[in-house]
Image (cartoon, rainbow, N blue to C red):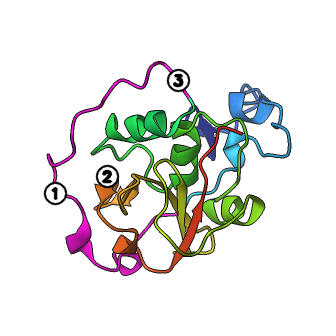
Amino acid sequence: MRATVVNGIAVALAVVGLLGTSVAEAAPSPEGGVVASEELFSLVTEADILDPSVATPEGAIPPDEPDGGVENSPDHAIAWYRARLGSTAYEGYCERAARLAWNRTRVHPSAIAHWRAEGPRHTTGRPPRGAFVFWNTSKWGHVGVADGAGGFYSTSVRGKIGHAKSVSYFRNYLGWIKGSRS
């Protein structure tokens, strides 16, 4: 068996002479990036979470507001996460979720690669709305999108896409980078 990522879903393909190249393998590599099948999986465990009590209770998030049709704004990135609150579809794929939320064209193989590749990096101060926020939770790291009030949206908040009121929710906070589409 071989696992290949197609449209964000791991699909097991039997390696038989009848199977051709998968969609993910056939896709050309974006400028300076990697194809989707090379994105790394990293599950955030209970040991990575500093204080689960800072997670926002379910139902406490205000409803989505229209973003004026702009698909690469902080409002759109946050709306993307809000529309998927409670979903486990992106567990272990935090960088992919952050990339899709911002409708980014550049692909990083992991959150830590994203942190290291872009800048300027900020290690102090409150992250602005829509900024990418990073943690050193494993060799792949973890990323979410800041809400502008000290919290963030991310995968792995109580095991699903969720909102936490503080960047201290996960251990080993690295800092933030301004959100952008590129």
Q: Secondary structure at mark 3?
A: loop
Q: How many other residues sit within 10 Å of disc 2, few (<14), some (14-19) or many (≥20)?
A: many
**81 relative position to 163: left or right:** right
Mark 3 and mark 1 lie on one chain; the one further toward the N terminus is 1
Helix, strand or loop: magenta stretch: loop
Rendered location of residue 98, percent (x, y): 53, 47
Image height of 120 relative to 124, above or below: above
Rendered location of residue 66, percent (x, y): 35, 23
Quadrant of res 52: bottom left
Q: Which mark is residue 162?
A: 2
Quadrant of res 102: top right
Query: Mark 3 against mark 2, which lies toward the viewer?
Result: 3
In magenta stretch: residue 113: no
Indicate the amino acid at tag 3. Val
Looking at the rendering, the stretch of residues picked out in magenta corresponds to: 42-71
**80 relative position to 12: left or right:** left
User: Disc 1 and disc 2: Cα gap in Å?
Assistant: 9 Å
Q: In percent of the image, x 71 and y 35: which residue is there? A: 105
Residue nearest the viewer, comparing 24 with 163: 163
In magenta stretch: residue 58: yes
Q: In percent of the image, x 33 and y 75: which residue is there? A: 46
Asked if the residues shown at circle 1 and circle 2 are in contact, with their CB atoms under 8 angstroms apart, the answer is: no
Q: How many other residues sit within 10 Å of disc 1, few (<14), some (14-19) or many (≥20)?
A: few
Q: Which residue is mark 1?
A: 57
Indicate the amino acid at tag 2. Gly
Q: In percent of the image, x 68 and y 41: which residue is there? A: 36
Asked if the residues shown at circle 3 and circle 2 are in contact, with their CB atoms under 8 angstroms apart, the answer is: no
State the quadrant of the C terminus.
Answer: top right
Mark 1 and mark 2 lie on one chain; the one further toward the N terminus is 1
